[in-house]
Image: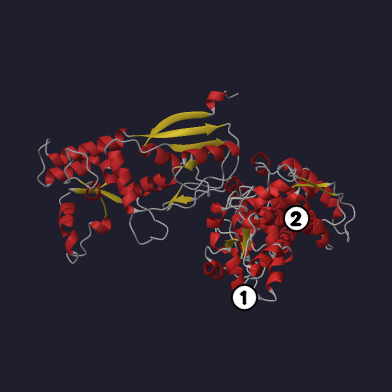
Amino acid sequence: MSTFTDRIRPTDFGISTYLDNLKKNLYQIPTFQRNVVWEKEHVKKLWDTIYKFYPMGSILVWKTDIQLQRHRQIGGHPISDNMISGDCQYILDGQQRTTALMTSLYGGKIKGQEAFDPTLYFDLSILDPEDLDETSYRERFVFWNEIDDQNATLLRNIPRKKRFAQGLIVPLRDVYHQYGSVEGNLVRNGFADYEDPHRFRLRKMKEVLDNYRMAFIELKGIQVGEVCQIFERINQSGKPLSIFDIVVAKTFRVEKNGTSGFDLREKFDQFRNSFAGEYKRVDDLTILHMLAVLIREFIPDSGVMNITDRYLNEIKTEYVETIWLEATKAIKKVFDFLDNHMHFRGPELIPYRYFYMTLVCYFYENNQPDYAFLKKYFWYYSFHETNLLSNTTDLKSNINNLLPCRNTLPVTAFAFDKFLINKNTLRDASYSARSARSRAILALMANQEPKDWKHTDRNVLAEVYYLLTDKPNLHHIFPTNYIDKHPGSSKLTSNSLMNIAYITQMTNLQISDKNPVHYLQEFDSSKLQTILDDHLIPPDLLNWSRQEQLPDDALDQFIELRVELILDLLRHKLDGIVFDVIDTK
């Protein structure tokens, strides 16, 4: 039995030993390490680091019995086969350095650069600088396309080609594996003195190759969730490893002997390409969570009891295959409901991501969805003061209550308790906070399908979709300079959602920072009050504009009037539910 201290163990190997172990299938490279960027400059810098005996950073290795999809080659060299028994050793961090080392010493093929020879050469004529420098490595380490003068037609390479013919430019692999031949060639070409600086640099490179030790950190007895966290913390400059990457690798299946192949990432990509709209931007992990709750509910004894990393690791290929067809239909219904029934033109306005999971369970194999019920369900859980859908316990409770409601029209089995809302929560909501309540208010405004104030037949959110950070499509009803001078008793900030309305960017630019008394006069028409109603803007504002005067407490009055309009709209949407309002101001 391993101890706690066995979980992370540092070790080291020589370069050649490490590469030989790769060829012997002692290490595997999972396919979530897929974005290798091989660049000449980076390869040369890596070897300059080794040549100067600087540390290159550690290789992170995960020892586990979990079988993952893995690369069969690295740099064109076979490193894996289909038969692995016992613990696998997966390289979690270090594929790029491994590729550079492998191809530098043994050649190979670089994806996207198939005609290029990545074998690296060492120029013995380049002096070791006495001081630190950052440029000599470009001349010391070269590739064949920097040596080949193409029969003396490529003038810049002629000097190097001559040094190559003299044995002064040699492949790194020959320094390591055929040192005697390389040194003998130097002697025959006039460099017989043992202390000759060219031979000295040859010996130094051989000593580096013989003695440079690569550092490894081995993880053992560590669960998937911890591995993802460790990877993210040591790989600050790269893409974090996610549980989705692990599940993709673990469920991958190669097509053979009449068994179809399976690639979850490919399925996700194909699914996204099968429908239009902004909801194809919903992230992979959220869709994976939607699959997980369907597996939990509709595949007995799956072991997938929750959507945490611990249980996502239990997802098997056959589980996904079993539910995939009906699951994708249900997911599309979820997106259609949010987009075309609720009029949220993208995922940024969904208050709780758990809505995706509860809704997909309701739509799964449901031929009679009750959209009126779903709308009430959405607003109830979006605005309830107690945040009834903010954790996995709430998620499970919601799903348990929704499942009996499928294929029942109208839904009568779902019991809504008393609805509770705090007026002050509405006052304090800010569009910069990105809170669930802020998204709920913005969703409510979007649900009204507001029209532009200037072009009153144009939907604001039809062409330019609002993102939470896209300020030009949100208008301050009372401009910032007015609020600075007239803060009111509520001490309203310009970020308050009670002071925000959706308008088009062009109309917003026309308004600029004018006082509402003045800019509303520019748009005043018989239709304007109806337009403002859809924006949940009280009629008092337009009346003040027509009277060309704002009361001293205009901001305070406006806030309270708008809060009441929002409450009245919610009462209407939650008709039949006990509606309780408190105010903690």
Q: Position of residue 109 (x, y in %)?
A: 39, 56
The secondary element bearing badge 2 is classed as helix
Compared with 545, 135 (above or below) is: above
Examine the image and state in which quarter residue 188 appears: top left
- Mark 1 crowd level (few <14, some 14–19, many ≥20, 10 Å Cα): few
Q: Position of residue 177 (x, y in %)?
A: 29, 41
Quarter placement of the C terminus: top right
The secondary element bearing badge 1 is classed as loop
Compared with 177, 542 (above or below) is: below
Examine the image and state in which quarter residue 151 appears: bottom left
Give whichever of 331, 304 is nearer the camera.
331
Q: Position of residue 159 (x, y in %)?
A: 15, 56
Compared with 245, 10 (above or below) is: above
Which residue position holds label 1? 455
Please report the residue visible at 73 percent of the width from the left and 51 percent of the height from the top.
Answer: 382
Q: Is residue 155 left or right of residue 575?
A: left
Amino acid residing under circle 1: His
Amino acid residing under circle 2: Glu
Q: Is residue 488 left or right of residue 158?
A: right
Which residue position holds label 2? 564
Does residue 539 appear in this view? yes
Please report the residue visible at 50 percent of the width from the left and 38 percent of the height from the top.
Answer: 233
Q: Position of residue 208 (x, y in %)?
A: 28, 36
Q: Is residue 304 left or right of residue 482?
A: right
Q: Is residue 408 left or right of residue 89?
A: right
